[in-house]
Image: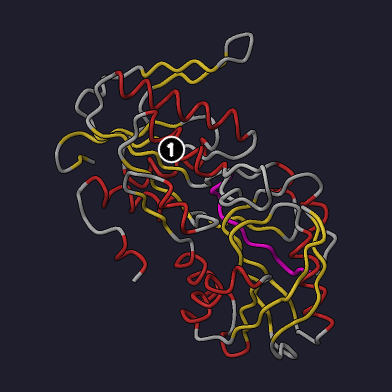
């Protein structure tokens, strides 16, 4: 495809080549030939092997594990494109790492999400596109346009295909995710419940109470990130103790660090559905109750609309 004011180019880093290929197939535009490799001492080296002068370039790179390596790849790709006279550079970051560090939780702590926003901006991008930011205010950390896409339309489509809607209840696993869960509940006309939890230490959570009558309902937990999996497992247990019929979970980003996959597999969660914003590991693919929901078409359509100067927000009306 072509942009409104010139050629469109897609450049991919090493974080999620499968997603980048799927986006390229949707747009019927091959990935630009580029080398993104390491020197012997693990320094990142990038070489763009096609002419991008005057092009509208979209760099597809999640800053997922290993977050620092993938972030450096993104910054160096951007610098290479800027020095190659690309007309406009858009960083497409399906999973924005460091997003959970969006405020100071205590004295003498950083706001790393702002630092990362500064790094990406100073590297030379003109625009950022991402998916389900952990905190919406991170858009304000950038002094350039940011498109925050939502996986909810894909999730709603999947839920409608797989469930009878008259007995569903959407559940937020914590108070902070109520807005996200309410938005999905509204789309499928389902009631909303909330898990009241107390986090004793980082990476662990203790469920305290279920707000709402979940008895007899099929519950769908909705959140943006699953990391250790502890919150989801505890939430599922609390819901089932309150006589919920079954518990499913839909989350945008499957970080799934440490023993998270084994924890989910051993849990009473019927199915965890995550998008491929982060490339699924072999362990995730082998898990019997984890399913990956493709989002290449959503991101591809957003790229197409950005290139042709059309509305992106209308995708979510």
Is residue 172 or residue 267 the one in the foreground?
172
Identify residue for label 1: 60
Is residue 156 or residue 306 the one in the foreground?
306
Q: Give the range drawn in magenta.
A: 269-278
Mark 1, residues whose alpha carbon is within 10 Å: few (<14), some, or many (≥20)?
Answer: many
Residue 13 at what x, y percent from top left? 48, 30
User: Who's the residue at 29% across and 65% down the image?
Assistant: 314
Which element carries disc 1, helix, strand or loop? strand
* Vertical comparison of 227 with 20: above or below: below
Q: Is residue 19 magenta?
A: no
Residue 27 at what x, y percent from top left? 32, 45
Residue 262 at what x, y percent from top left? 82, 52
User: Who's the residue at 82% across and 48% down the image?
Assistant: 259
User: Who's the residue at 50% across and 38% down the image?
Assistant: 116
**Furthest-front residue in this view:** 107
Is residue 110 or residue 99 the one in the foreground?
110
Q: In which quarter of the image is the N terminus?
A: top left
* Vertical comparison of 109 with 297: above or below: above
Q: In which quarter of the image is residue 49?
A: top left
The chosen color scheme is secondary structure
Residue 100 shown left or right of residue 128 in the figure? right
User: Who's the residue at 63% across and 45% down the image?
Assistant: 280
Residue 250 shown left or right of residue 85 in the figure? right
Q: In which quarter of the image is the C terminus?
A: bottom left
Tally the marks: 1
**Furthest-top residue in this view:** 40
Residue 40 at what x, y percent from top left? 63, 8
């Amino acid at each position: 495809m072509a942009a409104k004011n010139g050629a469109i180019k897609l450049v991919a880093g090493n974080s999620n080549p499968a997603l980048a290929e799927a986006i390229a197939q949707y747009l019927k535009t091959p990935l630009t030939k580029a080398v993104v490799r390491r020197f012997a001492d693990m320094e990142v080296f990038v070489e763009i092997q096609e002419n991008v002068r005057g092009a509208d370039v979209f760099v597809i790179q999640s800053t997922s594990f290993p977050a620092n390596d993938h972030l450096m790849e993104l910054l160096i790709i951007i610098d290479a494109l800027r020095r190659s006279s690309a007309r406009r550079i858009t960083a497409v970051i399906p999973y924005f790492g460091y997003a959970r560090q969006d405020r100071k939780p205590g004295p003498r702590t950083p706001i790393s999400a702002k630092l990362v926003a500064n790094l990406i901006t100073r590297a030379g991008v003109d625009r950022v596109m991402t998916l389900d930011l952990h905190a919406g205010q991170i858009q304000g950390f950038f002094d350039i346009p940011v498109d925050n896409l939502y996986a909810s339309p894909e999730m709603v489509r999947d839920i409608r295909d797989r469930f009878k809607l008259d007995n569903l209840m959407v559940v937020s696993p914590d108070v902070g995710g109520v807005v996200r869960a309410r938005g999905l509940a509204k789309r499928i006309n389902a009631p909303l419940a909330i898990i009241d939890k107390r986090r004793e230490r980082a990476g662990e959570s203790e469920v305290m109470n279920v707000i709402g009558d979940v008895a007899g309902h099929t519950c769908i937990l909705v959140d943006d990130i699953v990391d250790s999996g502890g919150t989801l497992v505890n939430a599922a247990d609390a819901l089932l103790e309150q006589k919920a019929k079954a518990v499913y979970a839909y989350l945008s980003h499957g970080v799934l660090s440490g023993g998270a996959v084994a924890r989910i597999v051993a849990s009473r969660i019927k199915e965890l559905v995550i998008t491929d914003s982060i490339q699924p590991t072999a362990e995730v693919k082998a898990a019997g109750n984890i399913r990956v929901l493709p989002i290449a078409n959503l991101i591809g359509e957003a790229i197409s609309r950005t290139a042709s100067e059309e509305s992106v927000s209308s995708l979510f009306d």
